[in-house]
Amino acid sequence: MDIFRIEGPIGLSGSVCVSGSKNASLPIMAATILAAGKSSLKAIPHLSDISVCSELLGRLGCKLTRGPDGDMCIDATVIDNPVGEYEIVRRMRASICILGPLLARCGRAEVSMPGGCAIGDRPVNLHVKGLQALGAQIHLKNGYIIAEAPNGLKGKDIFMGGPFGSTVLGTANVLMAATLAKGRTVIESAACEPEIADLANCLNEMGARITGIGSPRLIIEGVEQLRPARFTVIPDRIEAGTFMVAAAITSSELRLRNCRLDDMMAVVDTLRNIGVTVDADGDGCVVSRQGPIRPVDITTQPYPGFPTDLQAQFMALLSLAEGNSVVIEKIFPDRSMHVAELNRMAANLRKEGPTVIVAGVKKLIAAPVMASDLRASAALVLAGLAAEGTTIIDRVYHIDRGYERIEEKLNPVGAKITRENV
């Protein structure tokens, strides 16, 4: 098992390129199921979650090849095993995205209930509700979702809102299935995240007829068939936000390449309120901090609000603010396992339900800590960059799920991160 050994505090200087979006790549990979033939996807990051998805598609009958530059070819000519097996699906929640396209293409799908990061309960009832509205017959058996549509799917008006807002993966599943349904489908309270817009744009390139992209009301006119995809995924806004925080927490200046600020307005606004400078620059931006870190209050919300996937990273940054901050998690209320680990590094955090009170301290002190999930891992790396001494982070396999060898991106600009196998 790998660990990170991080020496701090350090300063950063230079340029970092943001990889393709993990959260866009996974549903787009699943979308290739909808069209027989060879799809070509560009800017797919090299991540363990991508490897899991590739293995999953391979079990369905697809043939996958990767190029060194991130290009991926998925040959979905044959889908002869429409089953998402527990052995694979338990390792990654986004595996549920194969349910909709398998059902639409094959008329039947069996997908295990998904796993993923330990960040709280994330039910799939809205996925099921949406597909049932399209005419699917669905039941649970031995931990598997069994979905059948022997007479095909039919368009329907569907409301997809839930207790914590719109469902991103649920919207993706229903959207993909609806492209091959007969007639018109309206998804109301659809997720508006850029990754869903990217999926919709990819589907349209494949011959789908989707309007309202980027809005909470998606309209899909079903077509008889789709053609294989040729598509480049968007940059990863969560990786970009993590690198922005890296510059801020180390009082440094970094240039980010391949970064779409239009997808990150809530993040950029929060950084500026904290005292961080973010300036657009070509295909990216320059991020810097010289003065003190100002406290702010953050509430995570569905897009275009502040993203839950950057909550932990910003909590690490606010640990060093001059004053008290409040962070309220409204998407995954139990997403707070990083709180105890940051406190081990001399942060002063107090959790009260879905709220964390962050009392700023003058410095963080290195300590051995344990990563509990993907974004908590990133928060601990950021804290390690700013802390005095040597921070040891265990279970860094979590960070490999969503960051493309993060140490190889940060070390050239001044970080001192060593990966060790123990």
Image (spheres, helix red, strand yellow):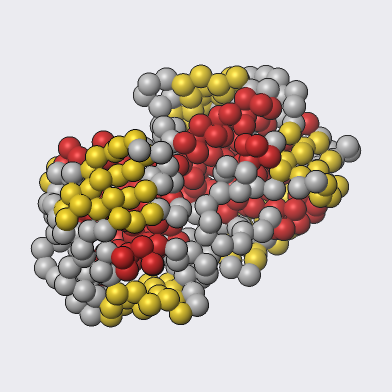
Residue drawn at point x = 67 percent, y = 31 percent: 34
Residue 30: x and y, percent? 61, 35
Residue 17: x and y, percent? 27, 39
Closest to the observer, 74 or 232: 74
Q: Name the outermost residue toward the right.
A: 151
The C terminus: image quadrant: top left
Residue drawn at point x = 14 percent, y = 49 percent: 12
Residue drawn at point x = 36 percent, y = 63 percent: 341
Res. 363 image quadrant? bottom left
Above or below — where is 303 with respect to 30? below
Above or below — where is 186 with respect to 101? below
Res. 368 image quadrant? bottom left
Above or below — where is 405 with respect to 220? above
Residue drawn at point x = 38 percent, y = 67 percent: 340
Left or right relative to 394: residue 295: left
Residue 275: x and y, percent? 19, 68
The N terminus: image quadrant: top left
Judge whether residue 212 can be spotted in this image. Answer: no
Judge whether residue 298 can be spotted in this image. Answer: yes
